[in-house]
Image: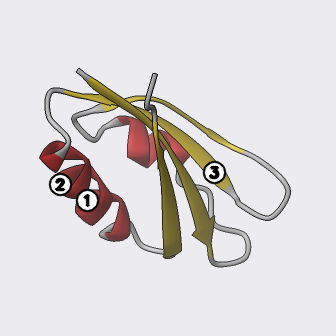
Amino acid sequence: MVKAVMLVRVKPQVRIAEKAKAIEGVKDAFDVTGRFDAVLVIDVKELSDIKKVALKVHGIEGVRRTETLIHVG
């Protein structure tokens, strides 16, 4: 299993956490304040699956950019 955290920036007044939770591989998601607007907790079978999750996240209306932090421990 590969674990990661995805940080998401969205357009103003957009909330994506609930939509992101419907994506396979996203184990939890919540909207936050600060430099990023949402945090997604990802748990997938292979490293290549993270790209699939990222592409689906970018397909959510209002998403501007993402940054993914992959667990290395």
Callout 2 amino acid:
Lys
Query: Along the polypeptide, which appears first: circle 1 or circle 3?
Result: 3
42 in relation to 60, above or below? above
| Residue under numbered circle 1 | 56
Q: Position of residue 66 (x, y in %)?
A: 50, 66
Quarter holding the N terminus is top left
The residues tagged by marks 1 and 3 sit, at their Cα atoms, a distance apart of: 15 Å
The residues tagged by marks 2 and 3 sit, at their Cα atoms, a distance apart of: 18 Å
Callout 1 amino acid:
Lys
Disc ID at residue 52? 2
The residues tagged by marks 2 and 1 sit, at their Cα atoms, a distance apart of: 6 Å
Q: Quadrant of residue 25?
A: top left
Q: Secondary structure beneath disc 3? A: strand
Callout 3 amino acid:
Ala
56 in relation to 13, above or below? above
Mark 1 neighbour class, 10 Å CA radius: few under 14, some 14 to 19, many 20 or more: few
For this orientation, the residue located farthest to the right is: 34
7 in relation to 71, above or below? below
Q: Nearer the viewer, residue 29 or 47?
A: 47
Q: Secondary structure beneath disc 2? A: helix
Q: Give the label, 2 or 3, closer to the camera.
A: 2
Q: Position of residue 9 (x, y in %)?
A: 62, 68
Q: Specify whether 32 is left or right of 69.
A: right
| Residue under numbered circle 3 | 38
